[in-house]
Image (spheres, rainbow, N blue to C red):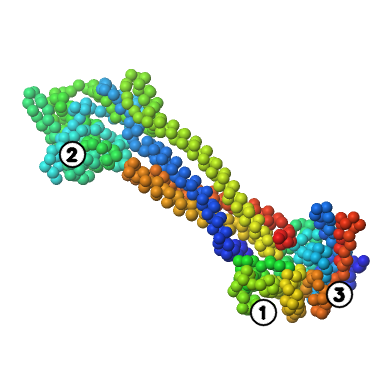
Amino acid sequence: MTNDEMSPQESGTLIYHLRDVVKTRESEGVAFRLSVPSLQIAQGEKIALIGESGCGKSTLLDMLSFILQPSEVGSFRFRPKLRDTKKRKKKRDEPLDIKRYWDRNKQNTLGDLRRHHIGYVMQTGGLLPYLSVRDNINLSRHVLGMKNDGSVEHLAKELGIHHHLNKLPEDLSTGERQRVAIGRALAHNPSIVIADEPTASVDPFAAEKIMSLFLELVEERQITVIVASHAWQHIKRLELRRLAHHTRRSEDGSVTETIVKG
Amino acid sequence: MRPFKTLRLATRDYLHEWQMSGCFILALASVLGPMLVLFGLKFGIVGGMIEQLVEDPRNREIMPVGSGKFTAAWMGELRKRSDVEFIVPRTRSIAATIQLKSSNHSKIVSMEVIPSDVGDPLLSELGTGPTELDSIVLSKSAAAKLRVEPGDEISGSLVRRFKDKKERAHLDLKVAAIAPVSAFPREAAFTSVKLAEALEDYRDGNAVPMLGWDGNIGSDSRTYPGFRLYAASIYDVADLHEGLVDLGIEVRTRAADIELVQRMDRNLSMVYWAIAIIGLVGFSLSLGASLWANVDRKSKELSVLRLVGFRTGDIMWFPMIQALYTAVLGWGLAAAIYHVAAWAINDMLASQMDVGQQICNLLPIHYMIALGLTMGSSVIAAALAGFRSAKIEPSEGLREI
């Protein structure tokens, strides 16, 4: 077990600090349990979550992006990097108690946090079919009321999709759509980007290209990243910290438990 | 700020999915359109008949049959009743004629004199009446024959046999107004009661000092053979009728016609409401179901919006805005369908109706009510569905296949 108390310097740089977070799910008599006795992610860290599908990667990522409420929470603290210096002075720069928001069902506060600090790349889709590539990338900026400063075009260029800017998602290949999704997750300069197997639906060659491009962009912007993948080979070269986890099944096969630590 | 963003996104989505949106609009219009036609028919047919009944004073007229002996005092009592709108005495019909001649035309026209007064229901549209001894209101056909207009001076005359001599009296009259055809279809002159009495007196050989006509001194106790009586509304006709019959006065009314139309109105209304309620329930269900299904279909996209940080309230607006588009456009299409149908129906039956009468008719307020109902039920259905989808955890919505 990791100790609960941390030295002040260490806790000062932690973007996530979770303790005893559990999510249980049950479907057709088979229970699934994800248990996180302790998880600490520092600002700017690059984290990889490797494992077979169904082991609970998505569940953890959803909880980290506040779109899934854990069944039990010891503590769940989130401390985004504040960009605006004025805001920093006004608001005390202290970790936010996400558990409290969940307990009080403050979905809108969680939504606000997500809007400001988190970028999320889904495994597939997640683009709005009625918006052009440009507007899809810009969506995360648009909801924050950020002015168009050319960063969408710049990002699109870096992602190699600038000639598709005016097209609709339906006119793009799967790989291109994933690039758009990555663009949207980065466009508003979040503190953290969470990617749930962003290249799982793409052929291995393209997957590797997209993954390294993604991590390059994240690196460039010094953003914390948590990426889930089932293939370690992709990730190994990219110098990510791998979260330790192991999965076990109960003898009768009715309960699957995954424990994540890190 | 963000509601506006939701508005933009909802609009883009609605346009992007124009085929789907078109289906929703068509589905709505195909239920609402026939409802409008149905209501238009009900309102046009029964409403038209009732309006005609209520508005046409002839339907409120109570006419004595034969001639009696009615005194002014008796009529004064009758006038006080709240269900009586108007009553004036009638002079003997044989004495109630006058010969008129205008300076515009050489022809002398003899016509019926109808005693009238302020508040005569037949002349209510004019806002004036023959109040003075020398003022006269001509029916449309009478005015046409004499070629006169309101304000014109005309001369009247009448003859009598008095002391074995044929005499003719003259008087100058002024055309106060011309009554519409609907008031009285034949040639007639509406005069004050005083003038009608004067004409009768003169013919009877009595003197009329007001007009400088010589003759015998008539008796003070005047009786009238009849009266012109109008009930306050068509619904009072039956009671008045009965009351007069109880007094031994035989009268003729349109009570039976009125009763018939009223019964028809009740029956038709019942049939209409039965159909309308069934239609309305079907309409609400189909609209609600399609909007609900639409929100369900969109739950993943709505979850994406929540993922990028839209608030629950903003998300709720999304289906509501789209529902409003469907409501307004569907209503517009339904109104268009109604217009075509109403035009066809009215055109088809135009030959069997009075000028200006419409068998299928809706007032602007009816359109507004239809719009209000449609928008209201759309927003409620969409809000319920939106609320449900907002309640789903975003991660669930996102993981849906």
Q: Which residue is mark 1?
A: A160
Q: At which x and y percent is residue B135?
A: 22, 38
Label 3, residues with CA under 10 Å away: few <14, some 14-19, many ≥20: few
Q: Are marks 3 and 1 on the same chain?
A: yes
Earlier along the polypeptide chain: callout 3 or callout 1? 3
Label 2, residues with CA under 10 Å away: few <14, some 14-19, many ≥20: many
Label 1, residues with CA under 10 Å away: few <14, some 14-19, many ≥20: some
Left or right of B356 in this view: B212: left
Q: At which x and y percent is residue B235?
A: 41, 31
Q: Are marks 1 and 2 on the same chain?
A: no
Q: Nearer the viewer, residue A198 or B118?
A: A198
Chain on which label 2 sits: B
The N terminus of chain B: image quadrant: bottom right
Q: Residue at x 17, y 42 (%)?
A: B146
Q: At which x and y percent is residue A255?
A: 87, 57
Left or right of B319 in this view: A214: right
Give amino acid for label 2: Leu
Q: Which residue is mark 2?
A: B173
- Up-down relation of residue B35 to residue A25 (above or below): above
Give amino acid for label 3: Gln
Q: Nearer the viewer, mark 3 or mark 2?
A: 3
> Element under label 1?
loop
Q: Which residue is mark 3?
A: A9
> Element under label 2?
strand
Q: Is there any visible trace of residue A230 in the rendered image?
A: yes
**Quadrant location of residue A27?**
bottom right
